[in-house]
Image (tube, rainbow, N blue to C red):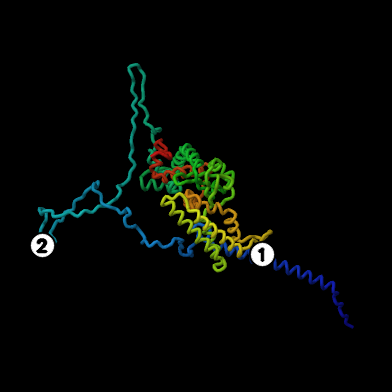
């Protein structure tokens, strides 16, 4: 006789239903989380140097063709009419002249030894003679007086040892390491191949160390000048030092550069650099939060904003029209303010500023309409975060329109600090904190010299001659 199983009660069925609904809600939440994570990973994978702060070298071989925001100007590429050219030209006083004579007539074959010269065609070849280090021997005479005292001749300045390298050789050695960023071994090989100077890597390292040690006064003067500047640019980037992560902090203007290194990216590193704590001008930067504690006012880098806006457009070309319109508005502001500086204007008209701000706010409203803030603990999209920054710090985004002494972006600092990443790509990290500090001091010296029209090798030669170049000198 079979037994009929007892049917579940209504209460049990309701409990099962509640459990299933709970499990379903948990699974749906997990699916939503995974979808959001997948979308974020796809977004990050699609970022390029045009839509983020990634360097162009990170785009890979499949990168898209370059896309410039500049409008066609109607000019052909290359040198423009009326501009000075840099073509190799013949000189009037060549160092060596060789005369070539024809020997026989091309017509009849007769010899031309006594024939008259009707014209001369001149062709000049620019080349370098074989380079070899010259050796200057200093013979310091000792002479004995009738009184019995022996006196030695005065030692010339810079001649400190029986055998040593001269200031120009030391300057070239420091140039190869500190400016061209060659590893010590390759720099030593270059000295041997090009100059015939067989300098060991140990000697080369000591030359670089002496170069860095001679720049303490220079760095202090540049630090004080930057702190007193009305507008200055600031940035920071990572650098491998002693096997760990360190940060190079940069402060710069159109004619000054200062680089310092610290284990902290934030306030400790900023304070150790010594510029921002005493700075009372307008700080131009990329929005890194610790910078906001310093300076009288700020200008956020709009090149970053343009890249972020481009990323928003590429993510949703049809639904984020506000971002494309914002790109065009910022470009219009940049073009007009740049033209105003070129023609020497003092300010942009109040009517134009009012119109710009109205359009700016309208675009932010349109962006918030399609990118509402989720609120609570939910993660905000990159577009929502960008809108919050453009809205909350609007005065710092648009300061370049109300003060023509302030630039549109922070590209000056980014160009200056790019050499730090280039050095790491070529030679790797630095083995010690002392070496990193020397690198930053030398980089500060050479960057500042170049901004003032002084060649890197010339500046280093002056330094090794005991005449360190300083800003404000010729």
Query: Label 2, on which residue?
Result: 108
Looking at this view, name the residue that lies furthest to the bottom. Answer: 1
Query: Label 1, on which residue?
Result: 33
Label whose residue precedes the other's in the sequence (1 or 2): 1
Residue 373: percent from the left, percent from the top? 64, 61
> What residue do we see at 34% from left, 42% from top?
133
Residue 120: percent from the left, percent from the top? 17, 54
Q: Relative to the observer, which residue lies in front, 90 or 310?
A: 310
Please state if 69 lies on the left or on the right of 25 as rendered: left
Q: Is residue 125 above or below residue 153?
A: below
Q: Is residue 156 above or below residue 85?
A: above
Residue 226: percent from the left, percent from the top? 49, 42
Label 1 vs label 2, nearer the camera? 1
Please state if 452 lies on the left or on the right of 224 as rendered: left
Secondary element under disc 1, as helix, strand or loop, is helix
Q: Which quadrant: the C terminus?
A: top left
């Amino acid at each position: 006789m079979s037994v009929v199983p007892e049917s579940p009660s209504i209460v049990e069925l309701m409990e099962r239903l509640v459990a299933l609904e709970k499990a379903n809600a948990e699974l749906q939440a997990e699916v939503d989380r995974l979808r959001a994570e997948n979308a974020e990973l796809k977004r990050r994978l699609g970022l390029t140097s045009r839509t983020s702060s990634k360097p162009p070298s990170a785009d890979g071989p499949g990168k898209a063709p370059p896309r410039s925001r500049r409008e066609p100007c109607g000019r052909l590429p290359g040198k423009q009419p009326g501009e000075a050219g840099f073509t190799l030209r013949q000189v009037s006083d060549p160092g060596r002249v060789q005369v070539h004579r024809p020997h026989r007539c091309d017509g009849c074959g007769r010899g031309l030894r006594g024939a008259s010269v009707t014209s001369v065609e001149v062709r000049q070849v620019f080349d370098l003679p074989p380079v070899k280090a010259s050796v200057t021997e200093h013979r310091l005479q000792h002479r004995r007086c009738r009184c019995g005292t022996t006196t030695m001749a005065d030692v010339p300045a810079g001649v400190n040892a029986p055998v040593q390298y001269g200031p120009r050789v030391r300057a070239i050695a420091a140039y190869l390491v500190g400016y061209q960023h060659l590893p010590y071994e390759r720099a030593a090989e270059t000295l041997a191949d090009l100059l015939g100077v067989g300098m060991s890597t140990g000697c080369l390292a000591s030359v670089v160390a002496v170069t860095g040690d001679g720049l303490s006064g220079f760095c202090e003067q540049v630090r004080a000048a930057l702190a007193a500047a009305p507008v200055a640019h600031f940035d920071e980037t990572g650098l491998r030092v002693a096997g760990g992560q360190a940060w190079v902090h940069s402060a710069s203007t159109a004619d000054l550069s200062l680089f310092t290194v610290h284990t902290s990216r934030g306030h400790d590193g900023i304070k150790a650099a010594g510029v921002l704590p005493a700075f009372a001008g307008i700080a131009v930067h990329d929005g890194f939060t610790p910078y906001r504690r310093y300076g009288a006012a700020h200008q956020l880098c709009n090149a970053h904003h343009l890249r972020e806006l481009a990323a928003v457009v590429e993510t949703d070309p049809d639904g984020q029209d506000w971002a494309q319109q914002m790109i065009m508005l910022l470009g219009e502001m940049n073009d007009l303010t740049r033209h105003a500086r070129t023609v020497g204007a003092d300010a942009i008209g109040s009517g134009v500023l009012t119109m710009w701000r109205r359009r700016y706010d309208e675009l932010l409203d349109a962006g918030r309409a399609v990118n509402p803030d989720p609120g609570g603990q939910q993660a905000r999209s990159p577009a929502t975060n960008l809108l919050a920054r453009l809205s909350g710090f609007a005065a710092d985004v648009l300061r370049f329109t109300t003060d023509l002494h302030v630039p549109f972006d922070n590209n000056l600092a980014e160009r200056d600090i790019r050499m730090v990443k280039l050095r790491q790509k070529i030679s790797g990290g630095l083995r010690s904190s002392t070496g990193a500090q020397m690198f930053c001091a030398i980089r500060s010296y050479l960057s500042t010299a170049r901004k003032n029209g002084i060649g890197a090798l010339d500046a280093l030669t002056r330094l090794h001659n005991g005449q360190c170049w300083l800003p404000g000198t010729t």
